[in-house]
Amino acid sequence: MDCGGAGMSEARPSALVIGAGIAGIQAALDIANSGYRAVLVESEPSIGGHMAQLSETFPTLDCSQCILTPRTVEVGHHANIDLRTYSLVEDIRRSKDGSAFQVRIRRKAAYVDWSKCTGCGACQEKCPFKVESDFERGVGVRKVIYTLSPQAVPNKPVIDAEHCRYLISKHEIESGTVAALTKSGKPAEPKCGACAKFCPTEAIDWDQKDTYEELEVGAIVLATGFDLMSPAQLGEYGGGQLPDVVDGLAFERLLAASGPTAGRVLRPSDGQEPRNVVFIQCCGSRDPARGQPHCSKICCMYTAKQAILYKHHVHGGEATVFYIDVRAAGKGYEEFLQRAQVQEQVNYIRGKVSRVYAENGHLVVKGADTLGHRSVDVIADMVVLAMAVQPRPETRRLAEMLDLAIDDSGFLCGLDEELAPIETLQSGVFLAGTVQGPRDIPESVAQGSAAAGKVIQRLRQQGGEAAA
Amino acid sequence: MASRTYAYFPGCTLRSHAHEYERQALAAGQALGIDLVELPEWNCCGATFPLNAENVMDLIAPARVLIAGGKAGGDLVTLCAVCFHVLRRTANFLQTHPFALERLNAFVEEGPYDGQLRPRHLLEVVRDDLGWAEIRQRVTQPQAGVRLAAYYGCMLLRPGPEIGLDDPEQPSVLENLIEAVGAQATSFSHSSECCGSYLAATQPGAVERASLRVVEAARAGGAAAVITACPLCKYNLEQAQREQPEESRLPVAYFTQLLTIAFGVDAPESAPWIVGAPA
């Protein structure tokens, strides 16, 4: 069978995988390695999901980026994977006989012709404007033309139209808010354009528009992942108000060697090394009053990991963890926790925190020590909130499109949470990773593979032949 | 200026410890065209909101006030943060629990109460019915250069979803009022911490500790005075400082005094934040 060319071969059965975090990547690779085609759609400019933001993984303290990159690179080169980054699934309709799905994908305008771009990075170097980076979770900046990280797959930049000086002024001229002629009578020209001037392959395409693609697939894997609840929703902890109160992902970026501080733990307000860091678990999770009764599952372990890594980065630093109870049920997890408590001497205080406020250049963490039957005030230089794992807004839209069941917290439901957790109410639609509820990396990978197994089974039953 | 008329429930504290609060509120109201018409007959609000939902009897005192408010027509406005707290929570409860309302109405002879009144605090009237622009216009004695700590305590804000006067974690109504009269609201870490409340009756030591923390936090923010809407908070914060020499105490004033002074109703020298202010 012909594998050449970027176009889809109609005869080849294929599956759509939505979301290219570690679960979606695993599903796509397994499908592709079985000889079927996988169309992997990702809304961000590059793949890897949250795992690409992490410094190290628990309980092995592997470098996250290092163990992820072989997978992302394999996806980027795989002949059986059609990668659609910076793209969104706009519509899904089931075919009349029910066996296939018609999918409409929108690729957002990147204003860069990726077929010309060599990924040299000159544009990012020359772009004069910096904005707060979502990938750096607010503790770092990026250029207006950017890739998510130096290891990005694909390593092609996009332009953030909302902040691009050239695109803004181009729009102003075209819409008439700025006079079409300058004072000297010449036609007004958009400002800046530094990236285009320095691009050696003339890849900047100011007129690029969103493009649409229709295709047919035999199965779908939903792997749209999670978001962390915004700390701004916890006003009592100063979230969104106090710069040195950050969430778990922001702290990952401060620990990461590829992060905005090159792996030095520096607090956002003044760039000083924090001597005391307080970690607060269950921030927004296990909180029925907030409509989020679920346990976010990963926080106990990543908090222990972050406390350990912090103590490795800042010698003599004090790390204190407030917890309700510690849930360390995975393989090697309890041992890891004991290491944090005994070997690394992280202070664990059982109890909730009522407030965090600033006083005399420090943060005061008011909490309860429910084992010591007392209230405690801990002085901290930085506070890390283990914010609740939440479904992404995108997930609800897809669930409505496909008529899938959603649980109380907004995660997708498996057909049967015990015996058919991968399947859904809709035949041919499968779940992988945190779209279904909080999961850690090994579970997400296992589920990605499981979903791929279901996809392969279905495509085979439909009589489609895999490539040799 | 168009005059606005509201039914007004003073409550016991304003007729025992907090006469000044009422005088200032009525005077400031007059300057703003707010006419507070006292209920012809009223009783104590009950002073605490009963958390035992089974016992409807505990709601009779506040319900009677609500009934009187309903008969007076229009909105029912109050000043004391505790009265406001109890009345609003009782009104919410009776609105959402028809069975309790029915039982209560069977018992209270002044009724029936229709469960529809939403009692308001004067701060809400000032903010929502007038707006800060109108306050600014009224100011003849701008309090420029004065740094004040906005102190809410608990009753005015919590529980957030039920009270709904302001964001319980990041409130702004008192700060906005302070800014509207030309003063500066200081950053204040303890603006919504408890003063110790009624523990004054059983554990005075606990109140003193809680109140002194609030005072110290206000002082650390550089405030010349603490602005409050609660007679109990004011009492506790002042009592906690009674051992200190008079000149080093941090004054505590009602938000209404800020208005009477800024409007020129009261003499500028009567403001506690200028006399003996440590700022």
Image (cartoon, grey):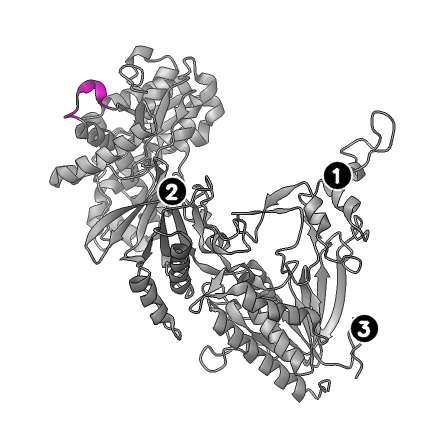
* Residue B172 position (above or below residue A337): above
Would residue A208 appear left or right of A65 to someone viewing this image?
A: right
- From where the camera sits, is residue A295 visible? no
Give percent across and percent down for residue A132.
Answer: 58, 45
Magenta segment, principal secondary structure?
loop
Give percent across and percent down for residue B247.
Answer: 21, 18
**Mark 3: secondary structure:** loop
Give percent across and percent down for residue B208.
Answer: 17, 35
Query: Is residue B255 on the magenta stretch?
Result: no
Q: Are marks 3 and 1 on the same chain?
A: yes
Residue at the spot x=76%, y=42% of the render?
A: A193
Residue at the spot x=62%, y=79% of the render?
A: A30
Residue wearing tag 1: A192
Q: Amino acid at mark 1?
A: Cys
Residue wearing tag 2: B169
Quadrant of residue A114 within the rendered picture: bottom right
Residue wearing tag 3: A5
Residue at the spot x=30%, y=62% of the render?
A: A341
Residue numbers of the magenta segment = B242-249
